[in-house]
Amino acid sequence: MLSRYYPAAYAPSVFDIDYSKLYSKGYRGIIFDIDSTLVPHGNDSTPQVDALFREIHKAGLKTLLLTNNDEERVRRFIRNIDTLYICDAEKPAVTGYLRAVEMLGMEKRQVVYIGDQLFIDIVGANNSGIDSILVHYILHEGETGLGIKRNLEKPVLWCYRHSRRRDRIGSITKEE
């Protein structure tokens, strides 16, 4: 029952993922969440994130941002990033995820979703038949409150860490 909330893999952050490894595993597209995955909620992209997207594209992977944010927010974020996007996606509804796969021109097995929320990002990807990577959420500097959803995720993450179903896609981080 809890396995519907389990990602296929976990990484501490998007910067810890070895995108060449993902490519070697057959992935050709990456769908990203924005807020708390790439940057703190509401923040613009950073030079580090811009460089990450260049690295990902250089590895031969296509990217797409799938977000519940509006178009103004997304356009501001991608000012220095060449990527496809879907805004107002109504995640975790599967329609946005499937549309993203279609926009990338790929099959589901060639795409991986990267996000920070179990009950939205990971559930939506899993329900869509897309592999997912959970990354630890990014807080604003000085932010200490986690909110109800983050506290509800804790027992599910404990079960995931002790499950045989963890890391179904194998080694994905730079250290492994």
Image (cartoon, rainbow, N blue to C red):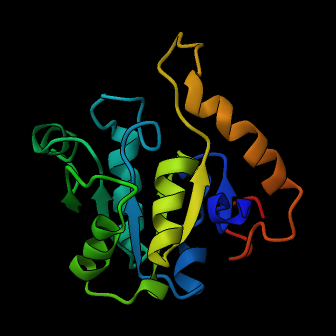
Residue in the picture at 42% in, 29% down: 40
Q: Name the one closer to the observer, 135 or 162.
A: 162
**Rendering coords of residue 146 (x, y %):** 59, 22
Q: Quadrant of residue 131?
A: bottom right
Q: In this view, does 72 lie to the left or right of 40?
A: left
Q: In this view, does 2 lie to the left or right of 27?
A: right
Quadrant (top left, top right, bottom left, bottom right) of the N terminus: bottom right
Q: Can residue 82 be seen in this view?
A: no
Residue in the picture at 71% in, 65% down: 3
Vertically, is 6 above or below 69?
A: below
**Rendering coords of residue 13 (x, y %):** 59, 46
Residue in the picture at 56% in, 37% down: 137
Vertically, is 135 above or below 40?
A: below
Vertically, is 10 above or below 18?
A: above
Q: Quadrant of residue 107?
A: bottom left
Q: Is residue 70 visible?
A: yes
**Rendering coords of residue 62 (x, y %):** 32, 74
Quadrant (top left, top right, bottom left, bottom right) of the C terminus: bottom right
Q: Name the one closer to the observer, 75 or 55.
A: 75
The residue most toward the top is 142
The residue most toward the front is 1
Q: In this view, does 149 lie to the left or right of 33?
A: right
Residue in the picture at 74% in, 47% down: 156
